[in-house]
Amino acid sequence: MIDGVKVKDLKVMPDERGLLMEMWRSDDPDFKQFGQVYVTMVYPGVVKAWHYHKKQTDHFVCVSGMAKVVLHDDREDSPTRGETNEFVIGWQKQRLIIIPNGVYHGFTAVGTEPAMIVNTPTELYNYDDPDEYRRPFDDPAIGYDWGVKNG
């Protein structure tokens, strides 16, 4: 596991009416601060990657469909530099992924439906000076194959 990344299985409480799932609580031991909440969606066959943040920590939960979330550690001072982690999350596996600042990340939909991720970053988005540093999804320096795996 990439240093600083945390993954938590989420408790889904179903009943005859539907379900309730807590995604993130301020009394969680890993809670730092609240910046904002937003939802991002990706269509099947599309990749949203790569980017990292210098300031903010992201907290991803896939609330619709299934998503493959991939993290890559390129931090110079990290003991896990060069490692890549892959997680499949969504309605079949409800998890929270905590992505520390400095870790490249991206995601794509798994299957035939779009995937929607709710993110609760620790910082507000700054429209004048965004805390986003990007590379192309197929950057050979990362070397990750976003293709479908069969077998």
Image (spheres, helix red, strand yellow):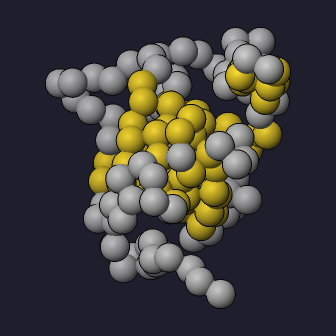
Asked if residue 87 is positioned above or below residue 63 in the image, the reply reads: below
Q: Residue at x 39, y 37 (%)?
A: 40
* Residue 107 shows in this picture: no
Q: Quadrant of the C terminus?
A: bottom right
Q: Position of residue 110 (x, y in %)?
A: 52, 60
Q: In which quarter of the image is residue 86?
A: bottom right
Q: In which quarter of the image is the N terminus?
A: bottom right
| Drawn side of residue 142 relative to residue 10, left or right | left
Q: Residue at x 59, y 16 (%)?
A: 33
Q: Which residue lies furthest to the bottom in this view?
A: 151
Q: How many marks?
A: 0
Q: Quadrant of residue 53?
A: top left
Q: Where is residue 62 in the image (x, y as percent from the top left)?
A: 57, 40
Asked if residue 3 is positioned above or below residue 141 in the image, the reply reads: above
Relative depth, front residue between 72 and 13? 13
Q: Position of residue 82 (x, y in %)?
A: 57, 70
Asked if residue 35 is positioned above or below residue 40 in the image, the reply reads: above
Q: Which residue is drawn at 50% across and 31% down?
A: 119
Relative depth, front residue between 130 and 113? 113
Relative depth, front residue between 70 and 90? 90
Relative depth, front residue between 140 and 119? 119
Q: Which residue lies furthest to the front in this view?
A: 16
| Drawn side of residue 10 relative to residue 101, left or right | right
Q: Position of residue 22 (x, y in %)?
A: 71, 21
Q: Residue at x 45, y 17 (%)?
A: 36
* Residue 115 shows in this picture: yes
| Drawn side of residue 38 relative to residue 7, left or right | left
